[in-house]
Image (spheres, rainbow, N blue to C red):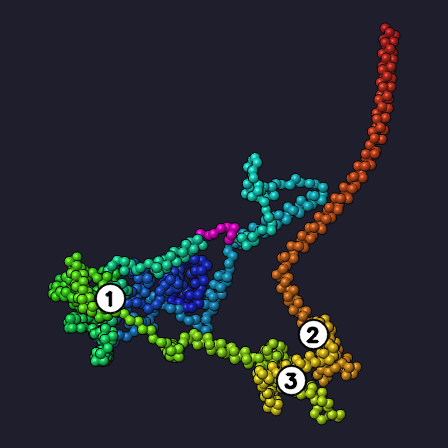
Amino acid sequence: MPRIMIKGGVWRNTEDEILKAAVMKYGKNQWSRIASLLHRKSAKQCKARWYEWLDPSIKKTEWAREEEEKLLHLAKLMPTQWRTIAPIIGRTAAQCLEHYEYLLDQAQKKEEDGEILDDPRKLKPGEIDPNPETKPARPDPKDMDEDELEMLSEARARLANTQGKKAKRKAREKQLEEARRLAALQKRRELRMAGISLPPRRRKRHAIDYNKEIPFEKRPAPGLHDTSDEVYDPTETDFRRLRQQHLEGELRSEKEERERRKDKQKLKQRKENDLPPALLSGSSEPARKRSKLVLPEPQISESELEQVVKLGKASETAREAAEESGHKASEPLLADYSLTPGGAGPLRTPKGPSLSRDTILMEAQNIMALTNVDTPLKGGLNTPLHETEIGVATPKKAGTMTPNNLIVTPFRTPGGTLEGTTPRGGRTPGSIPGSTPLSSATPLRDKLNINPEDHLDFDTNQSAKQFQKQTKQHLLKALSSLPAPKNDYEIVVPEDDPSLLESASQEHMVEDQADMDSAKEHERLEKLEAERKLQSLAVQRDLPRPLDVNASVLRPAHTEPPLTDLQRAEELIKQEMLVMQHYDALHHPTAHQRPGGGPRKGAPMDEAQHLAYLDRHPYRKYSREDLQAAEEVLKAEMEVVRRGMGHGDLSLEAYSQVWDECLAQVLFLPAQNRYTRANLASKKDRIESLDKRLEQNRGHMTREAKKAAKVEKKLRVLLGGYQAIPIALIKQIQELAEQIEQTHLELKTFQALQEHESLAIPKRVEALTEDVNRQVEREKALQKRYNDLLQQKELVEEALVDVQS
């Protein structure tokens, strides 16, 4: 009995990937064709899998509190209409139904005082998932069966075939058309070779023939017109304006983007320059950001309350100490900044709504109670429900929390409200019932008169006039208490002590951090410049230095015959040169002397060798004065030598000649790996040196040839098009030159032929004239003879007639 396979079941990663690729190729309408790629799934299951799980627009994140409230409210308004509720919430219908059931289960567990465990609708082992399209895909097994492997290979082959039947038919028709064209061309060639010429068929052109017509031609107007603006100067061509974007003009999107940026800049400038609308409106309340304020249940902790009390006591202590000291200047700066001065504050502060009520849980319990209600025929009380804030189509926002007195009432409240209280909505500050009007209410925390009085709002004009009158009386009272003016003046200019002024300015002046940093940087640069001047000239000028220090330039200490004074001085100079090379290689290495600084040949000296040599021959540092003194001594000695030898100013050519001659005397010995003079080397050493130099030159030529080949290849790619243009132009010029030369030869030939013909034509005309005259005479003679013969014929005929008669 064959095995019956029922389509469906859990989805796997392979099937999901095949479904995604098939939707990308066939679209979201051909579900039967897509299902043909999946042997175990039907078209309906494929469509459900896409719209319930694989669609990128599906939201799979955790449910927010607002979404849950909206779900419960919409489920109450439209029960079981999940397809209608889903787009409103932004989830799929299956997600809405599943989460709704989850909330009901959680509410039921809460009522039964049970532990809220995981999802109670989770499948148990052995159960079959009724909606596998809404669940994540399972991983593929390592050993897939033959049916799955065959399905995978077939889907790969079908999805890889980008050419369908229509594309194959078009390609076949194109090949047939090309075959017919080649056959017709071969037929015309064979007929032409056989001497049969066929008239060319003219094709009907449905477009412009650019060989005969000029596209977009604008014919000039008849008559005379000014052509001064048509003068073309090829030297003033602006090649920067020849791009496509300049020829086509500005696009609409670019124009809109420019206008959008301009509007944004205008709005920004208006916000920076103009006054805020709240100040222009003259409202008594300050402009504040009305944002949602959520606070915990405890308004203030015990430790924070104790800290506030301690701060208040510290402020009182500072104010009392200032009063005892007798300084009048400190009295207005240390005002009483307690929150409720004079006992005029509110008796209690209203609390915000408690956060312990779970609105979603109570709404879910209400739905559970309404679902399980008995028939109303039994009578009794209605089902008790929790009072929640969800009563309209859109859930209400959380209620306002405890108001902040420092933000709500920063100005004076002359209408009679208590200090620190905020009037209820819809009422003026003077219309709160049960409040006692205070004529001279003190503003909250405004003992320094920080808050302006221009923005105060009064109930009536009488209140405003009364406030102005009180202010005027207070000002007159303060002015009347001023002492009488005394017009006796005496100006005494104290003598300034420069030392005291300088010391005072130094004491009270605080140097800017930027100036300090700049001074430090300047000192650091000066120190580096001073250190650089004490270094060797090779380091100062950043000249290349050898990788290894060649100590073989020194002569042996004990030689026979002994060294002269000049040779000993030369050895001292060489010794100092070696010490300087070791020191520079250790403290100021070049890029090739650093570890890993570049390609090297051989094993260069490391830091340990340099340190060991400097330990044996320490490097002596000289001051700037010593170096300048040595430089002066050298200049003086050079001047003495130049005068004694009679040397004049050395030109660049003479210097180059002497340098080349000296360089030619230096010879490198590869066997000994050192340089020596050419006159001291043997013939064998010279040959080896020349061989070594030849090898070096060949290697250098090889490297340069490779570099040149790379550069030539790049230039060929870069300039290939530009080189092809002049080559084509040169070829055209050569062809035109050949045509001109051929035409010139033909012209000379025809000119010579004209000369010969002009000489031969009169003779030819004369000969023809003679022939014509001769022909005319002959014609006359023949006509005369014809006439004579005709007369003889008539006479003979008459004679015959007479004889017969």
In the drawing, does residue 311 fall left or right of residue 641?
Answer: left
Dot 2 amino acid type: Gly
What is the magenta range? 245-252
Residue 605, located in which quarter of the rendered image? Answer: bottom right
Where residue 515 appears, as percent x and y from the top left, is 44, 75
Dot 3 amino acid type: Met
Q: Pick the quarter of the image with the C terminus.
A: top right
The label on residue 451 is 1
- In the picture of the structure, the residue carrying the numbered disc 2 is 699
The CA distance from mark 3 to mark 2 is 32 Å
Q: Which mark is first along the chain, 2 or 3?
A: 3
- In the picture of the structure, the residue carrying the numbered disc 3 is 577
- For label 1, the SS is loop
Q: How many other residues sit within 10 Å of disc 3, few (<14), some (14-19) or many (≥20)?
A: few
The reply to whether residue 377 is visible in this rendering is yes
Work out whether 352 lies above or below 617.
above
In the drawing, does residue 56 fall left or right of residue 470?
Answer: right
Dot 1 amino acid type: Asn
Work out whether 739 lies above or below 688.
above
